[in-house]
């Protein structure tokens, strides 16, 4: 204490950090939907890694209304290890809701969110903690390759990310839900944001704070099948776009301008024809114009409708999820 101003050597600094980390808690949040076959293996792999991290830990599994025995598996696992906790939703509310529930329940000074299928390599958790120790408040797992995904899945992800990056102004390219958040970022997402329509990847970017990225290769799914249907993904994409940007509404204006220019052109043509004494021809032009304008109007109504639907959802203010039962969690927090 006497000479506190002297420069601290890197080793001393590390020791100091290790000491301060000893009493820190790391929460690992795992959304799980029909993961009966893989959850036990995933948890054992994750626990092995956590044992090497030099922090206290807890694992929170959010069973997103599984129709298989995922929650029974969890109960068995929690009976052997008290630091494994879990909740079960009353039905399937989706991964976004599951992540939110996990963040709400987690008590950790840092929270890692990771998939239940081991596609997010748990062995990177120590590297994430390292980045967090160095001051990052959000550590993003960024996908290096999607080599294990099929061509169609990759194309889908590409279109999804590119659309979002362009329209939302948030860089989603190769981003994932595999992240470490500092308590300050967790609080920002769970307490400071009242919205119900959530897009975790976007929000963790939106909150700001110092970010750090860690590259990872997407692993083969350990067990079972990917859960995203095309509709599910489209729904997520719509939520992501509508909650993050009003750019599509500008597209409506753009369509209007295009129609106007087109309309002027056709009107001019008709006027010239009238002066030249040409009779009422141009049946196909009329039909064509009607159809184009009609579809522009319908597209525009659809886009506006998406926003109105989201506004309606927010106004209804329904809870993002309902909890059916829990293991090792005091229900007040969930
Ligand atoms: N998941 C969930 N609710 C759902 C769908 C998926 O909690 O409605 C979980 C799933 O159990 C897994 C993670 O979200 O832990 C990612 O799901 P999946 O592997 O199906 O998607 P992908 O790897 O293609 O993103
Ligand atoms: Mg997966």
Image (tube, rainbow, N blue to C red):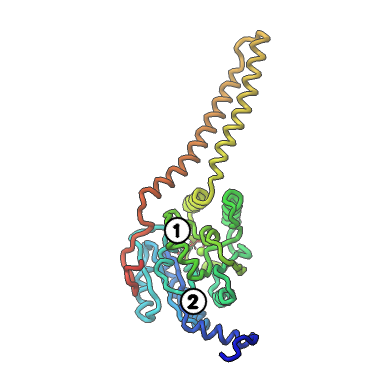
The alpha-carbon separation of the residues under discs 1 and 2 comes to 30 Å
* Residue nearer the viewer, 209 or 303: 209
Residue 9 seen in this snapshot: no
Cβ–Cβ below 8 Å for labels 1 and 2?
no
Residue 44 coordinates in the image, percent (x, y): 46, 78
Residue pointed to by mark 2: 46
**Left or right of 42, for residue 327:** left
In the image, is the residue at mark 2 within 8 Å of ligand 1 by its beta carbon?
no
* Disc 2 packing (10 Å; few <14; some 14–19; many ≥20): many
Task: Report the residue that reaches farthest toward the top.
Answer: 277
**Left or right of 218, for residue 25:** left
Residue 35 coordinates in the image, percent (x, y): 43, 67
Question: How many numbered discs, if any?
Answer: 2
Residue 189 coordinates in the image, percent (x, y): 47, 62
Residue 72 coordinates in the image, percent (x, y): 34, 71
Please give the name of the residue rendered at 49% of the width and 76% of the height, measured from the top-left corner: 46
Residue 77 seen in this snapshot: yes
Residue pointed to by mark 1: 193
Please give the name of the residue rendered at 43% of the width and 63% of the height, measured from the top-left corner: 190
The tag on residue 216 is none
**Left or right of 314, for residue 148:** right
Is the residue 299 above or below the residue 176 in the image?
above
Q: Earlier in the sequence, mark 1 or mark 2?
A: 2
* Disc 1 packing (10 Å; few <14; some 14–19; many ≥20): few
């Amino acid at each position: 204490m006497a000479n506190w101003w002297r420069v601290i050597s890197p080793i001393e600094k590390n020791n100091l950090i290790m000491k301060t980390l000893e009493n820190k808690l790391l929460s690992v949040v795992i959304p799980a939907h029909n993961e009966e076959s893989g959850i036990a293996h995933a948890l054992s792999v994750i626990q092995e890694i956590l044992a090497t991290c030099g922090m206290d830990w807890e694992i929170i599994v959010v069973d997103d209304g599984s129709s298989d025995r995922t929650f029974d598996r969890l109960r068995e696992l929690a009976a052997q290890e008290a630091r494994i906790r879990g909740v079960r939703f009353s039905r399937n509310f989706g991964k976004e809701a599951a992540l939110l529930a996990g963040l709400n329940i987690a008590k950790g000074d840092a929270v890692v969110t990771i998939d239940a299928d081991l596609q997010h390599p748990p062995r990177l958790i120590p590297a994430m903690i390292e980045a967090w120790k160095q001051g990052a408040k959000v550590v993003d797992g960024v996908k290096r390759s999607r080599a294990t995904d099929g061509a169609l899945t990759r194309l889908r992800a590409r279109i999804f990310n590119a659309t979002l990056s362009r329209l939302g102004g948030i860089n989603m390219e190769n981003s994932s839900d595999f992240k470490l958040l500092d308590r300050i970022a967790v609080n920002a997402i769970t307490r400071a944001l009242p919205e119900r329509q959530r897009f975790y990847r976007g929000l963790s970017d939106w909150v700001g704070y110092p970010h750090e990225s860690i590259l990872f290769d997407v692993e083969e799914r350990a067990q079972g099948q990917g859960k995203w249907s095309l509709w599910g993904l489209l729904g997520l994409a719509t939520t992501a776009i509508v909650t993050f940007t009003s750019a599509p509404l500008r597209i409506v204006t753009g369509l209007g301008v295009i129609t106007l220019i087109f309309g002027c052109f056709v009107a001019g043509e008709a006027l010239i024809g009238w002066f030249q004494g040409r009779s009422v021809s141009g049946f196909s032009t009329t039909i064509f114009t009607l159809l184009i304008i009609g579809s522009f109007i319908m597209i525009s109504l659809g886009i506006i409708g998406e926003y109105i639907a989201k506004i309606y959802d927010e106004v209804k203010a329904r809870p993002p999820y309902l909890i059916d039962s829990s293991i090792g969690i005091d229900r007040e927090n969930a």
